[in-house]
Amino acid sequence: MKKALILFIPFILITTATRAQDANRSLFIKDSLDTYINRALTNWRIPGIAICVVKDGNIEVMKCYGTKELGLPARVDENTLFMIGSNTKAFTGTAMALLEATNHLSLNDNVTKYIPGFKLDNKAAGEQAIITDLLSHRIGFKTFQGDFTFYNSDLSRQQVMEKMAHIKAAYPFRAQWGYTNSAFMVAGEIIPKVTGRPWEAYIRDNILAPLGMMNTLTLTADLPSSLNRTVPHTLVDGRLTAIPYAQLDNMAAAMSISSSINDMSKWVLALLNDGKVGARQIIPAEAIAATRKPQDVVGMITYPNGETDYRLYGLGWFLQDYAGRHLVTHDGAVNGYLSSVTLVPQEHLGIVILTNTDQNQLYDALRWQILDAYFKQPYRNYSDIALGKYKANEAKKQAINKELRDSVALNLQPALPIANYTGKYRNDIYGNITVTRGELNNLEMRFEHHPKMYVLLQPLGGNRFYATFSDPEYGKAVFPFIFQNGRITGVQVKVDDEIERDPYLFTKAD
């Protein structure tokens, strides 16, 4: 998904001995930012990026670099749209808190009060779950659990909700935090029950329009027709490639917003001003405070300066302390896009970074680079440090894939005649897949709820096949077919970890 969650990966503590350690580090923003970003765009192969820094109620930096699409001349500007992915969640959390502040509901209300048909495999959990549980990732699901079924699929919101009832939660109810995109979708579906308007209309009319975020889109279906938009990019076999827009409106409340750096500056300025725009109170201050109240413990985090601390979660925000300051942050990741939003309320400081490739860590490194500049921390080039680690990891992946391609080239034969592997397979959560014969001894797999996607299966010998998804976001893997009592009884399907981390077992229908 690509990744509706990105947890901060601690950087190796490499301190660059430089006079910048003793200088006024805030000069980095004024004197060095352009050089830093332009160099990083080349190193990371990022087509376009937009950044904004607000401080004390003013925009200190709003800059755009690069192009909307690789190889084309149109430049990113302040009103160019990027998908913001899971940074949508803060809008949903704020909307629910706003509804509480205006006495439409209570965040402690049971979900079934508004959606009587809501169920979970754990019957008691489904009955006891409250709105806050949905907004803080504590219904018992493992991080990304169910997302292969839901993400970029043709399922409706109602169908996603129905399928959630068939997922066997990895954890006991409220026992452990697990990032759950589908839970935010359910929260969004409460809005029409109390307002008579769908999530997308309520967000537009009660948050976006009053803040003057007139270019921001709530639904991904509207993005391709926008005149000023970026194009998503990812790496395909080492080449940066433009890819189709993900269609995410069935999970809208978790990840569907597209916005510009200009509009996002208005969002951040209002959040740092207790919901006010000038003298107008757009969002009640108590609603903003509610979103920043810790609800669950995510885990420990190690920062670039060596500090360690607990990371908490509110309602659509990660909450943590760094260099003596309280941070309110979130990242966003969907096909071809990565973004970050960071608030430092006590410093009246906000940072927004938008990029149109999902294969970079600059969106994160630049956040810490800017924070360190304002906090007068020792200089470390986080982009270079992250790039070295990224290239090492990519080299490992490429080596593994080369080994698998070399095995395919050996023309190893399957354990059984190729026709034995064809047919229809079913998983109780996902639904159906179909395996048909392709060229030579290859197979092709197609998916009921991802009708535009297929997988090429090439024999690796025995009952193992090298799987290459037509959508590069889903990755490459080895699919083992299950052999019992002289026949094929199932197949194990694995997508990229950033979509879902556990494999699905599909049983052959004879």
Image (spheres, rainbow, N blue to C red):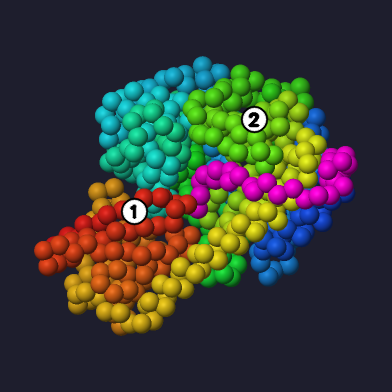
Give the residue displayed 66% in from the left and 38% down from the top: 306
Q: Circle 1 is placed at which residue position? A: 503
339 lies above or below 479? above
Q: Position of residue 257 (x, y in %)?
A: 57, 44
Residue 321: which quarter of the image?
A: top right
Q: Is residue 289 left or right of residue 448?
A: right
56 lies above or below 233? above
Q: Nearer the viewer, residue 384 or 194?
A: 384
Q: Position of residue 141 (x, y in %)?
A: 38, 38
Q: Residues within 10 Å of mark 1 (few under 14, many from 20)?
A: some
Q: Say which amino acid is labelled 2.
A: Asp
Q: Is residue 335 left or right of residue 437?
A: right
Give the residue displayed 14% in from the left and 67% down from the top: 487
Q: CA distance from mark 1 to mark 2?
A: 35 Å
Judged by depth in the image, the label closer to the viewer, 1 or 2, is 2
Q: Circle 2 is placed at which residue position? A: 321
Q: Nearer the viewer, residue 148 or 286?
A: 148
- Ranked by sequence position, the earlier of labels 1 and 2 is 2
Give the residue displayed 36% in from the left and 82% down from the top: 410
Q: Nearer the viewer, residue 457 or 428?
A: 457
Is residue 193 something that shows in the picture? no
Q: Residues within 10 Å of mark 2 (few under 14, many from 20)?
A: some
Give the residue displayed 69% in from the left and 23% down from the top: 274
Which mark, by number, is residue 191?
Answer: none
Give the magenta-colored segment's residue range: 1-28
Q: Position of residue 200 (x, y in %)?
A: 52, 39
Q: How many marks?
A: 2
- Label 2: which secondary element: strand
